[in-house]
Image (tube, helix red, strand yellow):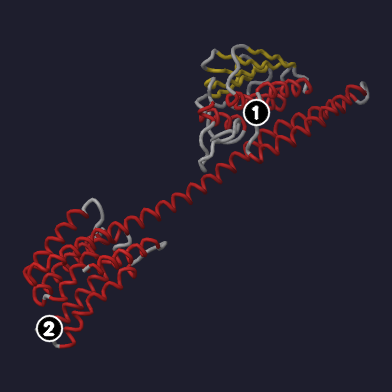
């Protein structure tokens, strides 16, 4: 029976390598019944009509069970289990009645059982079927029938193992495709948020400085030219930041963002007040807090109507805090988290890094407060979906 074991494993492995194996991969094994078919038509069987009927019944049940075994719903259906039990009865009856080559139906029964019965019930089913095949084969052909018992057991276990592996491979392939899809969606979300934060702030600064230059052209040409120089500088910086955002490796700087925010506030006629205390935070925490200062200052320029804005950065070695408060209108929407762009998107970024962001009216103005662990590097530099660490300062979602 060594040839049976060898070719059984090869065929099952080939079936497992296919993208979507089905019952056709187990049909060639019905050729094991050619000896029995020859007995029926050659007149060697004691009752050819009964043997032919039994052969037809076995083949029909085998095809029914194997084709239903490649879908979990049909594999676990009661009708499949009943068909497998009937197939076992027919196999035992044919083996006891005719013996010889008819005993090879037991390995075929093992194939069908391995396809229809999976873990955790497989061990018990395989052992029971092997014992049954051995008992029937020994009673029919003597101790030489023990080879049939081993062939039945090995065909059951190997078929189930190969088909289970094939199912696992398909599930892993589907999981990889889903992860790739999510990675694309996350990158789109990152890109849209970065563009919102970058362009929203930059365009607001350019508009404010252009208005200031227009007002100054009739009164102070030198001051107007200074504003135009600033517009050119902001535009060039915006081009650089957009290129960095596209590649996903923009390195944020809290000091640079505070300086840019102060310049934009002054151009809009808002007096900036900057306060800093405590040790400097980690670069990754600085990058996230820089986004907060940029977005908060942009909102002050756009919506507040304020005359004064205070940017305060403080830390105690464990947590770092940024507070942006203005004395303008306090009727802007509150923000405590959630998705979307602007402050809501920033709240989500900070939550991912273990921080918080709140925004709302306070004492006749509007206040944005952000807190982060001072060593937020581990929270920010999580592995990307492709297993590569995200670049420093790159927001995570």
Q: Looking at the picture, does residue 360 appear above or below residue 142?
A: above
Q: Nearer the viewer, mark 1 or mark 2?
A: 2
Q: Position of residue 340 (x, y in %)?
A: 58, 36
Question: How many angstroms separate mark 1 from mark 2 (CA)?
Answer: 87 Å
**Is 139 positioned to the left or the right of 320 in the image?**
left
* Rendered residue at 44%/53% (across/down): 173
Q: Tell me whether the residue at label 1 lies in contact with that at label 2, contact meaning CB atoms closer than 8 angstroms.
A: no
Viewer-side residue, 362 vs 14: 14
**Is 62 positioned to the left or the right of 395 in the image?**
left
Badge 2 marks a residue whose secondary structure is loop
Pointer 1: residues within 10 angstroms few (<14), some, or many (20+)?
many
Q: Looking at the picture, does residue 13 appear above or below residue 283?
A: below
**Residue that lies at the very extreme toward the bottom in this rendered image:** 42
Q: Position of residue 23 (x, y in %)?
A: 32, 68
Image quadrant where residue 36 sits:
bottom left
Q: Position of residue 52 (x, y in %)?
A: 17, 82
Q: Looking at the picture, does residue 197 appear above or below residue 88?
A: above
Badge 1 marks a residue whose secondary structure is loop
Image quadrant where residue 350 sits:
top right
How many dots with numbers? Answer: 2
**Quarter in which the N terminus is drawn:** bottom left
Q: Looking at the picture, does residue 16 appear above or below residue 257?
A: below
Pointer 2: residues within 10 angstroms few (<14), some, or many (20+)?
some
Reading the image, the residue beneath label 1 is 252
* Rendered residue at 13%/76% (across/down): 100
Residue 45 shows which numbered tag? 2
**Is 132 positioned to the left or the right of 192 in the image?**
left
Q: Position of residue 318 (x, y in %)?
A: 51, 16
Image quadrant where residue 137 sits:
bottom left
- Give whichever of discs 1 and 2 has the lower sequence position: 2
């Amino acid at each position: 029976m060594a040839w049976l074991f060898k070719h059984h494993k090869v065929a099952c492995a080939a079936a497992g390598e296919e993208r979507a194996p089905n019952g056709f991969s187990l049909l060639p094994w019905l050729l094991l019944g050619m000896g029995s078919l020859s007995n029926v038509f050659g007149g060697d069987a004691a009752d050819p009509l009964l043997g032919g009927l039994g052969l037809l019944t076995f083949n029909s049940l085998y095809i029914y069970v194997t084709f239903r075994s490649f879908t979990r719903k049909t594999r676990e259906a009661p009708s499949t289990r009943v068909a497998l039990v009937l197939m076992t009865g027919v196999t035992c009856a044919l083996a006891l009645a005719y013996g010889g080559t008819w005993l090879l139906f037991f390995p075929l029964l093992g194939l069908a059982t391995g396809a229809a019965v999976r873990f955790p019930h497989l061990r018990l089913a395989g052992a029971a079927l092997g014992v049954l095949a051995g008992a029937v084969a020994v009673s029919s052909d003597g101790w030489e029938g023990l080879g049939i018992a081993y062939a039945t057991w090995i065909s059951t276990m190997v078929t189930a193992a190969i088909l289970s592996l094939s199912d696992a491979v398909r599930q892993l392939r589907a999981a990889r495709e889903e992860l790739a899809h999510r990675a694309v969606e996350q990158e789109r979300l990152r890109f849209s948020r970065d563009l919102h934060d970058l362009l929203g702030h930059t365009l607001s600064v350019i508009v404010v400085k252009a208005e200031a230059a227009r007002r100054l052209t009739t009164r102070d040409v030198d001051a107007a030219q200074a504003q135009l120089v600033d517009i050119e500088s902001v535009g060039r910086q915006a081009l650089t930041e957009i290129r960095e955002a596209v590649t996903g490796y923009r390195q944020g700087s809290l000091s640079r963002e505070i300086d840019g925010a102060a310049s934009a506030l002054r151009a809009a006629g808002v007096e900036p007040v900057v306060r800093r205390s405590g040790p400097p935070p980690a670069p990754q925490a600085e990058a996230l807090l820089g986004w907060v200062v940029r977005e908060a200052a942009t909102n002050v320029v756009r919506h507040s109507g304020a005359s004064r804005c205070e940017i305060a950065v403080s830390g105690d070695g464990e947590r770092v805090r940024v507070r942006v408060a203005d004395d303008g209108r306090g009727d802007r929407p509150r923000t405590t988290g959630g998705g979307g762009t602007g402050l809501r998107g920033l709240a989500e970024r900070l939550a991912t890094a273990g921080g918080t962001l709140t925004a709302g009216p306070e004492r006749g103005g509007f206040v944005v407060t952000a807190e982060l662990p001072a060593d937020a590097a581990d929270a920010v530099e999580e592995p990307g979906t492709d297993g590569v660490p995200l670049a420093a300062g790159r927001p995570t979602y």
